[in-house]
Image: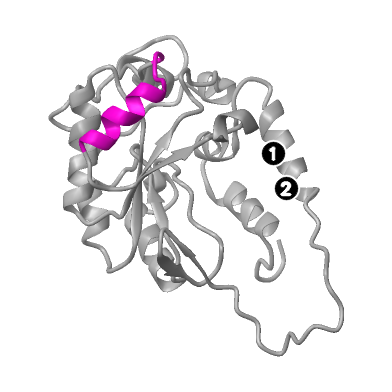
Amino acid sequence: MEGEPVNVNEFQELARQALPKIYYDYYSGGAEDEYTLKQNVEAFQGITIRPRILVDVSRIDLSTTVLGYQISVPILIAPSAKHKWAHPEGEVATARAAAVCDTIMILSYRSTCTIEEVASSCNAVRFFQCYVYKRRDISANLLQRAERCGYKAIVLTVDSPRLGRREKDIKNKMVNPQLKNFEGLISTRVSTDDGSNIEAFDANTAFDASLSWKDIGWLRSITNLPVLLKGVLTHEDGG
């Protein structure tokens, strides 16, 4: 690529060139035939802004609030895992970037930096993303650590009672890094000779496939933080 990147697509191409294929496939890939991933991209491209004419635009203000917290633009950094595969400082670097841009980072439960490391990296508003495990003590431990470290909300992923079958990771025999957030809670070392080590790790940490609305009440009972639901896909569920 000639010159500096000027849009998101060009940054993605730089990532493809810079990262080992196994890591790029993980970041860019989806489950099965990646049909939903393609649909998401196409749906976003289909969003059109309807401009209004003869409106004073000499002063533009994109700032807004989320749960009462002021941010510079209506864009948050979504939870994504394993940032150290892309940069040695991992999620700490992402947190600092979010702070500079005056927006909110949502830290993934599968971060390669700990909840505490990210919290101490800079002064900013942060949320923490999690799942509910069959072993409730794991979820409780993560949530309570996030609350002690000053995270401002819990983001519960609700659209993944079963993880998708990520075929690129299986073909690449992806090996899960040490996930420091789970040290002392479960064994983070998973040995498998059949496909993705990451897939085996998530299966063995036992996401609770019976997760339902009653569990939201349990979650609220163990934290004083607001709980946001991530992954509401059907209109009727949002009522």
Q: Residue 31, labelled with which disc?
A: none
Label 1: few (<14), some (14–19) or many (≥20) C-alpha neighbours in 10 Å? few
In which quadrant is the N terminus drawn? bottom right
- 216 and 102: which is toward the camera: 216
Spatial CA distance of label 2 from label 1 is: 6 Å
Whole-percent x and y of residue 217?
31, 30
Q: Mark 2: which amino acid?
A: Phe
Residue 214 in magenta?
Answer: yes
Q: Residue at x 45, y 38 (%)?
A: 229
Residue situated furthest front in the rendering: 239
The location of residue 26, given as percent across then percent down, is: 52, 35
Q: Judge by depth and name the residue closer to the eye, 41 or 153.
A: 153
Residue 83, given in percent of the width and then of the height, sits at: 40, 47
In this orientation, which residue lies closer to the viewer: 204 or 88? 204
Bounds of the magenta span?
Answer: 209-222
Q: How is the image coloured?
A: one colour
On screen, 152 above or below 206? Answer: below
Magenta-drawn stretch contains 216? yes
Furthest residue toward top: 194
Amino acid at the residue labelled 1: Asn
> Badge 1 is on which residue?
40
Q: Residue at x 41, y 24 (%)?
A: 213
Above or below, 134 against 159 in this view is: above
Tell me the quarter of the picture where residue 5 sits. Answer: bottom right
The residue under the point 52% across, 25% down is 169
Q: Find residue 181 and report its image quarter.
A: top left
